[in-house]
Amino acid sequence: MALTLLTAQQRDETHRAKASEDRLKQKLQGLEAELERTRSEGKAIYAEMSRQRRALQEELWTRSKQLEEEVRGLREQLETCQREAKTAREEAEQALREQDETLAQLHAHVANMEAKYEEILHLKAWCSQGSLDCLLAKMRTVKPQWDAAVLRLHTRHKEQLRQFGLNPLDL
C-alpha cells in the first residue's frame, strides 16, 4: 500500500508536471507567436521607415537641386545687373564729360558773341553817317553764322536730353 500510495503520488506529480509542462508549452507557443508578430510589425515598421527615409532623401535632393538652380540664376542676374550698372555709370560719366565740354563751348561762344557785339558797337562809333544802317549791315553778315551755331547747339542739347530719357518739349 505504501507503494501504491507512492505510485499514486508520483502519478499525481507526473500529471501535475505534465499539465504544467503543457501550460508552459502553450505559454511558450503564445510568446513565440507574439514574438513573431512583434518581429513582423518591427519589419513592417522598419520597411516603412526606410521608405520614408528614401522619400525624404529624394525630396531633399530635389529641393537641393532647385535651390542650386535658383542660386545660379540669381548669381547670373546679379552679374547682369552689375554689368548694366557699370555700363550706365560709364555712360553717365561720359554724358557729364560731354555736358562739361558743351558748357565750355557755350562759354567760349558767348565770349565770342560778346566780342562781336563789342566790335559791332565799336563799328557803330566808327561809322559816321547812317551808323544804324552800317550796324544792320554788319549784323546781317554775322547772323547766318550765329544762326548755324545756335541750330547746332540746339540740336546737340536736344539729343543729349533724349539720351537721358527726357523730352525736350517738356522742359
Image: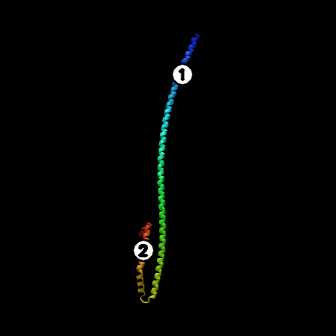
Q: Position of residue 102 (x, y in %)?
A: 47, 73
Residue 162 placement: quadrant: bottom left
Which residue shows up at 51% across the image and 27% down it? 30
Q: Are discs 1 and 2 less than 8 Å apart at CB?
A: no
Q: Disc count in the image?
A: 2
Q: Residues within 10 Å of mark 2 (few under 14, many from 20)?
A: few
- Residue 171, visible in the rendered structure: no
Earlier sequence position, callout 1 versus callout 2: 1
Three-letter amino acid code at disc 1? Glu
Disc 2 target residue: 152
Q: Is residue 113 above or below residue 9?
A: below
Disc 1 target residue: 21
- Residue 105, visible in the rendered structure: yes
Query: Which quadrant holds the N terminus?
Result: top right
Q: Position of residue 170 (x, y in %)?
A: 42, 69
Q: Secondary structure at mark 1?
A: helix
For the residues labelled 1 and 2, the Cα–Cα distance comes to: 122 Å
Q: Secondary structure at mark 2?
A: helix
Q: Is residue 171 above or below residue 22?
A: below
Which residue shows up at 55% across the image and 17% down it? 14
Q: Position of residue 22 (x, y in %)?
A: 52, 22
Q: Is residue 68 above or below residue 5?
A: below
Residue furthest out toward the bottom:
129
Three-letter amino acid code at disc 2? Arg
